[in-house]
């Protein structure tokens, strides 16, 4: 297996197949990637279980912030249980206070629930809202997460590359730092040079309008995108090429 892990986030059946058959090491399964990713349907989870690729499910009950009510958290617990029922590998979630600090109480509750089902756990980009990322890193490690998905506190991972590299150094192998947001083949080498070994990308491309009438009635967003098999394969090849060129003899 490659030293460099490629996670592809998808929100459609076509995206699932594009990721699983073109080199993804892991899939993050979502709905509504255009809104940052929400919890997918049970049907899409069931389909994902048949891909043969490790799948983590986004547990996010609504768009917007990560400040959750008791009802939101109850929904998230049920969706975590559904993920386990479908036989998938793990879950991805986050929770914050209004000032951006991680909501440790909510996260403890959710991760405790995930552990009951022996699910892998990743903290989503709610991490990037924290006012002190190195401090938040230690909190997340103490909570027992397996992975942090982060752009280094910037709008995109390429913009946050310096902080991402610092987080990798501070983590010292205690947790996976997964660089995500705006990751394309054009940025892969720079992120790997910064010390990252795990990249997260949608590998999205615009979706062609097949029904002009549906677009006219507003059912079709002009910026709709889906996972492009060629982009997944190209990013996988870029990681493999980088690894081959950095082998220490």
Image (spheres, grey):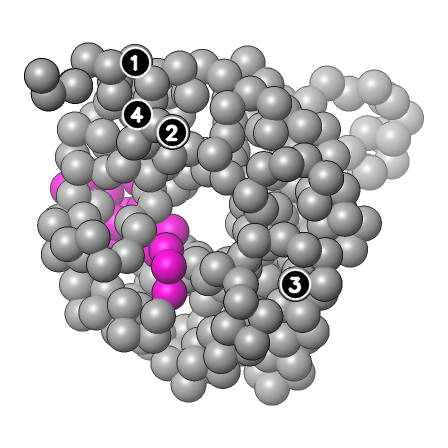
Q: CA distance from mark 2 to mark 3?
A: 26 Å
Location of residue 103 by image quarter: bottom left
Q: Is residue 54 visible?
A: yes
- Give coordinates of residue 106: x percent, y percent: 47, 81
Is there CB contact under 8 Å for labels 4 and 3? Answer: no
At 69% from the left and 23% from the top, the residue drawn is: 207
Q: Which residue is labeled 4 in the image?
A: 188
Alpha carbons under labels 4 and 3: distance apart:
32 Å
Q: Which residue is mark 3?
A: 84
Q: Of discs 1 and 2, which sits in the foreground?
A: 2
Q: Earlier in the sequence, mark 1 or mark 4?
A: 4
Q: Which residues are magenta?
A: 145-162
Mark 1, secondary structure of its residue: helix
Name the residue at the left extreme: 249
Question: Mark 1 or mark 3: which comes first in sequence?
Answer: 3
Mark in front: 2 vs 3? 2
The mark that comes first in sequence, 1 or 2, is 2
Q: Earlier in the sequence, mark 2 or mark 4?
A: 2
Horizontal side, residue 182 vs residue 159: left or right? right
């Amino acid at each position: 297996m490659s030293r460099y892990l490629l996670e592809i986030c998808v929100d459609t059946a076509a995206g699932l197949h594009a990721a699983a058959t073109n080199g993804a090491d892991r899939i993050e399964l979502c709905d509504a990637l255009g809104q940052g990713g929400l919890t997918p349907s049970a049907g899409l989870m069931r389909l994902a279980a048949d891909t043969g690729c490790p799948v983590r499910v986004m547990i996010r009950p609504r768009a917007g912030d990560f400040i959750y009510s008791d009802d939101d958290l109850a929904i998230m617990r049920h969706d975590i249980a559904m993920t386990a029922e479908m036989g998938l590998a793990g879950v991805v979630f986050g929770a914050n206070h209004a000032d951006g600090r991680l909501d440790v109480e909510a996260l403890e509750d959710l991760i405790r629930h995930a552990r009951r089902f022996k699910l892998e756990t990743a903290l989503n980009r709610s991490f990037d809202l924290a006012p002190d990322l190195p401090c938040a890193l230690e909190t997340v490690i103490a909570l027992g997460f397996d992975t942090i998905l982060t752009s280094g506190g910037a709008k995109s991972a390429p913009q946050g590359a310096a902080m991402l590299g610092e987080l990798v150094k501070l983590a010292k192998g205690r947790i996976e730092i997964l660089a995500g947001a705006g990751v394309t083949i054009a940025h892969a080498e720079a992120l790997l040079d910064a010390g990252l070994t795990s990249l997260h990308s949608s590998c999205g491309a615009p979706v062609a309008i097949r029904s002009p009438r549906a677009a006219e009635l507003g059912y079709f967003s002009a910026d709709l995108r889906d996972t492009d098999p060629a982009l997944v394969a190209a990013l996988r090849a870029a990681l493999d090429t980088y690894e081959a060129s950095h082998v220490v003899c």
